[in-house]
Image (cartoon, grey):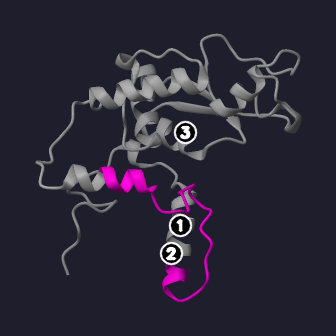
């Protein structure tokens, strides 16, 4: 049996230090739950935040129309201009926020968006504070890019925010804090608690 040259420990293809990242446990839980479902167990999937319902009718119809005999190809790197304009309009109409379409990047998911943002913002060796509890993928992605993460535990009554005054948490100068935007928006709107 031949040893796989791409496996860790092989002398033929060494792995980078960036490959030494903790697994994203939600995907391990998904694999276990999927295996159990295949074995006949009744599983309710809550592990990765996927929608439990099928796509809306309008989305299905649009997908069928897009695939109906037309050539499929790559889009522009930041996404189709008409989609970016529609997303900008959604933010204006729904949230009252003006975001120029040129500042919108369409990604294949939030992790792709995090990766783009983190690559644009941080160089290897940077230190980034992460609120805990928080989204585990932040740490995994940042550490894969050679960025040191520092966990800052947040009190339960803080809505997971340590940006409020009077919390006794000091952010050293030059640090960047990654935290979940939803909680910050709730605080700005006075909906905490």
- Name the residue at 20% across, 57% down: 12
* Image side of residue 120 versus residue 130, left or right: left
- Name the residue at 49% across, 30% down: 147
* Image side of residue 133 versus residue 46, left or right: right
From this view, report whether residue 27 is shown above or below residue 124: below
Q: Is residue 189 visible?
A: yes
Mark 1 surroundings: few (<14), some (14-19) or many (≥20) residues within 10 A = some
- Name the residue at 80% across, 19% down: 164
Secondary structure type for disc 2: helix
Quarter of the image where the N terminus is located: bottom left
Task: Give the quadrant of residue 161.
Answer: top right
Determine whether label 2 and label 3 are within 8 Å by CB.
no
Residue range corresponding to the magenta coloring: 34-62
- Name the residue at 54% across, 57% down: 51
Dominant SS in magenta: loop
Secondary structure type for disc 3: helix
From this view, report whether residue 138 is shown above or below residue 85: below
Disc 1 target residue: 30
Determine whether label 1 and label 3 are within 8 Å by CB.
no
Mark on residue 171? none
Q: CA distance from mark 2 to mark 1?
A: 6 Å
Disc 3 target residue: 138
Mark on residue 34? 2
Closer-to-camera residue (3/184): 184
Give how far across and how far down residue 157 sits, in percent. Answer: 88, 35
Of pointers 1 and 3, the one earlier in the residue sequence: 1
From this view, report whether residue 42 is shown above or below residue 25: below
């Amino acid at each position: 049996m031949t040893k796989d040259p791409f496996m860790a420990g092989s002398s033929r293809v060494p792995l980078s230090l960036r490959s030494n990242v903790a697994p994203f446990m939600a995907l391990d839980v998904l694999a276990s739950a999927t295996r159990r479902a295949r074995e006949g167990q009744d599983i309710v999937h809550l592990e990765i935040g996927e929608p439990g319902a099928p796509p809306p009718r309008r989305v299905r119809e649009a997908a069928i129309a897009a695939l109906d005999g037309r050539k499929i190809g790559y889009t522009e790197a930041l996404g189709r201009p008409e989609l970016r304009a529609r997303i900008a309009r959604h933010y204006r109409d729904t949230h009252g926020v003006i975001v120029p379409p040129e500042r919108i990047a369409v990604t294949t998911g939030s992790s792709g968006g995090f990766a783009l943002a983190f690559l644009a913002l941080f160089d290897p060796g940077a230190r980034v504070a992460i609120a805990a509890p928080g989204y585990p993928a932040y740490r995994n992605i940042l550490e894969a890019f050679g960025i040191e993460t520092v966990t800052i535990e947040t009190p339960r009554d803080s809505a997971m925010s340590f940006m409020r005054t009077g919390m006794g948490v000091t952010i050293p100068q030059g640090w960047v804090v990654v935290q979940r935007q939803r909680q910050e928006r709730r605080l700005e709107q006075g909906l905490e608690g």
